[in-house]
Image (cartoon, coloured by chain):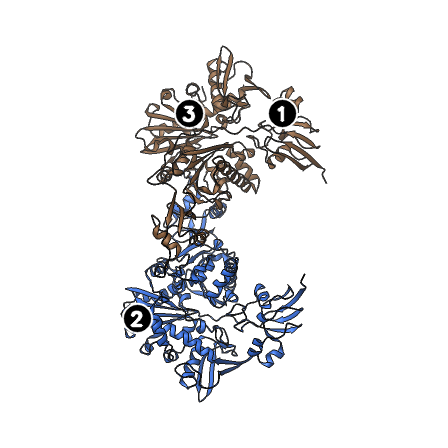
Chain colours: A blue, B brown
């Protein structure tokens, strides 16, 4: 039998003592015990993002890869890549602080007074008499605007338990189809909802007052699934290799949602039971994980997912425990056009515009939508997660301390960071600037080749230099070529030219911070559109909030999803051609 | 601490060794351990129906009540009323055989080819291709007649798990609203449903082949809730006295339904998972117990139940474990007009008739419906359970061996029994005959007084004489007065006379066996209607089967329930007057 080792793990929020077998991989132990990394490779030893500091105890010798990645000082301080450590002694180690993801708090939203998605209403029932013996539920439906709805037996039970004691005055929460909650009439008439934008990397959450439409709290977190891979394909891979993988990723996202709901509720000092509705958007893979559905068919041709319809159900049925709100999973379009894009379209209003608009969402994939009220076309390009800071040596998400803009003048690099905190890495907009500035200053040529050296030092980080490497340039080049080629193919299909586009909406955390000039400089977007580029921030989150506040907007999501014409690029000859052309800066 | 006693209980089906504390009540111990009695009083020591035979060990002394009820021979054999026994020593005892309830197996039913309630269909989906990437569920709904329906995530999961392996050929079971089941296309296209008539005393169950409409198996059982009282009021009393009472009665009926489903499936040699639909009818209290709803408001004025709507849900949500069929709880009308009556009306077709019909269901209560296609009136009279054999000294339900007809000629009593078995007691139709024959032979006078003696010996039973007592006559007198007065009041309200009634439907096990002449003789029904009386057997069960086979018939139940005009008799002055008049035979 193998020896048992004891690990004393000091984390940012929690510390834990964990016992494991001799020889176990440290990354896996940490991941299984809730210590999270933004590790794109999912612990495969490739991305160099799972740093830990060993404070005492002897681990296995430092690998060549670690030596190539970590400075002598880092190594002397005990820094290791946890995925390269196999436990062979009792250890005390520190897991570095995980920064709270920075999310965009969108502007104010309006309540839909005419047709809200969810209504909470005080209703006085006629008390029963010998000449009016209608059942309690009949009384409720006879009084309720719109009459009969679906109701769970639990709520019928509750109605009969509280009605007499509350003098037949009850508060009823309902939407078009269901009774969502019943409370004694003496409870406050206030109602909240949560809009969740579950990105591959980041989860953004908004707590809305359903009556005023105001966002009263926001919260952002790194998607806990990140430890199973930075992109959805890695996570699908995990589920294919592990029979329990889908269940693991399902439970992970569901318990993270539960945690987010608790945090939002406590931020605004309400009880989670006062949250009656939750809209959820995300890409198709993420939505499958939320629903506990197999994703393998998404990863290989012909890319047919299990389920893309808009889907409503109660929180408990999804496995959530903090609330029994009604959950609205907004519709997806195809395997690679998810409900985040549908919500983004809703937020941009491009589906109502007379003129042609272009929506580009540069997340882990690059989704592109082109169209107007007369029709929408969408495609998805395997742009890679470079613009989310992944696959970039010192890339990070849009977290506090991320370098979000860079300028090179006379060989000197200056930069800004999110929240003006000490730099911890480079996020998407910083990545874009790096390439544009390197091009501008002749550090790279138009083929992307670095003229001198193999990397550019951008800043001094706490764990050594933050640099931008030749390999990083290549990642950006591939990403921008995919997007630019996607736009060209779509314009061709619609028989339009770049000049016909009235507005370009750039969505996502990246889109909000990018330097438009840099985007045009590297050829991500046609130069002619420079003046038309609008950053619309987290449009997926904004769309989720809009749908949460309005039945009409939620209905529009279904209309958008069913009307979009999806263009598959993987079997398109002209895409390959355009892609090759677009590789040149 | 009290001493622990050991009971060796020998039952008909199971025997058990049970340990209890000194002083515990034997009836309660037996009930809690699954040994059932048809004890109307629910163990309160009043009804004398919970006989057990103590084979060894000393119990507490025989009570005065037991002495008045049991013969010297019975006492010498060790017979006791279990509710009068408190355990003070180790005992070995026998719990007498519980007869399987006798239920009516109705005739053949027709499948509704045009609009069945539930459809099972083989569907070949278009396999996905690069140019047709629709999600699996979209493919299903694009192919399914009637398009999109509600579907659980479990079934979406199943669809995605089986589709590829079954060459995209699947069997889909659905109704108008829901996808009920999805199976690989290679499974047999056969489908079954169960119609359940849950009476206060007896549960009747029918297994139907949903494609042919044929009843392929039937099963009847005493309602296991009987141990908590013969009538619904006693059972509601139990839930008022015990905080867990509603949950206890809910679990009891649900687990009994599970058992019945297993038995039906095994009788026809099918798997319970091939049962896709279950219609359930019962009185309003029973339906509340099935739904786990509080019933206290049913027991006291103004008699407003929690829920009377037709309600559809999946078996698992009701707590059933044998199948995940869709369950259709047919609608009730009011606290005392349940879905059994609605189903009875459906079975009789009186709601479609041009002419006036009268439906009388003599169960534990007496429900009366009067009307035609132009409108239906209903009332419920507290007739008491005399016609179900309860509250009658030697009364029994419609079980094998029950005396179901009696004739007295020249002072000699002759009788028949159900199944021609040795007599075990008197069921409803025998009770009716007893009174009619006693009247006819001058044993009682028109006021119900027994001219000589206090009881009439009907038969020799295995446990002593089966008699009909003066007290029994009084019970029948009260019951028949309630029914007769109810009919009179309803006729008056409709400004009709008995001669306007074209047909009289007698429903229930009692109705099937009663001697029409006896009914008219004692004044239960007006003499003028003698030729119009039709026994329609278990019309509640027949209605439940009809609804199971046809969406149209199920819809008609909702129409019937919402159109019935309920007449409350308890605050009606003319009812009291008529009741007094009808007390005379």
Residue receiving disc 2: A491
Rounded to the nearest angstrom, the CA distance separating label 2 from label 3 is: 84 Å
Question: B157 or B281: which is nearer to us?
Answer: B157
Q: Which residue is mark 3?
A: B484
Q: Which residue occupies the foreground of this view, A335 or B107? A: A335
Mark 3 belongs to chain: B
Q: Which residue is mark 1?
A: B65
- Disc 3 element: helix
Identify the residue at horizontal 53%, vertical 57% (top origin): A244
Q: What mark, if any, has residue B292 been given in the picture? A: none
* Residue A176 can be seen, yes or no: yes
Q: Quadrant of residue B486?
A: top left
Please name the residue shown 54% across and 42% down the image.
B247
Q: Residue A98's quadrant in the figure?
A: bottom right
Instruction: Specify the farthest residue to the top.
Output: B410
Q: Residue furthest bottom?
A: A410
Chain identifier of the residue bearing label 1 in the image: B
Above or below, B123 relative to A373? above
Q: Same chain for labels 3 and 1? Say yes or no.
A: yes
* Vertical position of residue A528 compared to residue A29: above or below: below
């Amino acid at each position: 039998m193998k020896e048992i080792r004891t690990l004393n793990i000091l984390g940012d929020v929690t510390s834990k003592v964990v016992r494991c077998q001799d020889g176990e991989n440290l990354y896996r132990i940490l991941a299984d015990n809730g210590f999270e990394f933004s590790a794109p490779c999912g612990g495969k030893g490739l991305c160099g993002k799972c740093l830990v500091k060993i404070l005492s105890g002897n681990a296995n010798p430092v690998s060549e890869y670690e030596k190539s990645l970590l400075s002598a000082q880092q190594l002397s301080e005990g820094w290791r890549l946890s995925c390269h450590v196999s436990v062979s002694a009792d250890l005390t180690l520190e897991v570095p602080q995980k920064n709270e993801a920075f999310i965009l708090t969108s502007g104010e939203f309006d309540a839909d007074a005419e047709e809200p998605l969810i209504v909470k209403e005080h209703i006085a029932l006629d008390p029963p008499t010998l000449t009016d013996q209608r059942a309690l539920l009949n009384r409720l439906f006879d009084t309720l605007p719109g009459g009969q709805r679906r109701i769970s037996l639990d709520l019928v039970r509750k109605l009969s338990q509280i009605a007499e004691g509350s003098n037949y005055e009850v508060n009823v929460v309902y939407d078009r189809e269901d009774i969502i909650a019943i409370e004694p009439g003496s409870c406050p008439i206030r109602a909240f909802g949560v809009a969740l934008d579950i990105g591959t990397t980041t989860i953004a959450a908004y707590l809305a007052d359903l009556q005023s439409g105001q966002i009263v709290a926001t919260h952002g977190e790194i998607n806990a699934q990140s430890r199973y891979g930075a992109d959805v394909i890695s996570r699908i891979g995990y589920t294919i290799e592990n029979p329990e993988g889908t269940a693991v990723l399902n439970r992970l996202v569901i318990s993270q949602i539960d945690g987010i709901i608790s945090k939002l509720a406590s931020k605004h000092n309400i009880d989670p039971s006062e949250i009656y509705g939750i809209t959820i958007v995300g890409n198709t893979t993420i939505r499958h994980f939320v629903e506990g559905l197999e994703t393998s068919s998404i990863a290989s041709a012909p890319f047919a997912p299990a389920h893309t319809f808009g889907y409503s159900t109660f929180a408990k049925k999804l496995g959530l425990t903090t609330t029994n709100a009604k959950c609205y999973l907004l519709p997806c379009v195809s395997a690679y056009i998810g409900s985040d894009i549908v919500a983004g379209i809703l937020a941009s209003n491009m589906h109502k515009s007379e003129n042609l608009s272009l929506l580009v969402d540069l997340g882990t994939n690059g989704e592109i939508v082109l169209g107007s009220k007369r029709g929408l076309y969408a495609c998805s390009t395997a742009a890679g997660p470079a613009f989310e800071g992944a696959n970039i040596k010192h890339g990070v998400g849009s977290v506090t301390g991320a370098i979000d803009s860079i300028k090179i003048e006379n060989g000197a690099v200056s930069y800004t960071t999110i929240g003006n905190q000490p730099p911890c890495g480079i996020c998407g907009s910083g990545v874009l600037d790096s390439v544009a500035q390197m091009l501008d200053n002749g550090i790279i040529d138009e083929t992307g080749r670095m003229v001198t050296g193999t990397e550019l030092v951008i800043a001094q980080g706490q764990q050594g230099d933050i640099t931008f490497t030749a390999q990083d340039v290549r990642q950006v080049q591939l990403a921008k070529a995919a997007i630019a080629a996607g736009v060209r193919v779509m314009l061709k299909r619609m028989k339009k030219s770049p000049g016909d586009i009235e507005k370009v909406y750039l969505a996502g955390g990246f889109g909000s911070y990018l330097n438009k000039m840099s985007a045009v400089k590297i050829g991500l977007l046609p130069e002619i559109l420079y003046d038309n580029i609008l950053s619309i921030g987290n449009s997926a989150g904004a769309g989720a909030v809009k749908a949460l506040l309005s039945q009409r907007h939620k209905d529009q999501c279904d209309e958008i999803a069913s009307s979009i014409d999806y263009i598959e690029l993987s079997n398109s000859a002209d895409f390959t051609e355009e892609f090759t052309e677009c590789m040149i800066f």
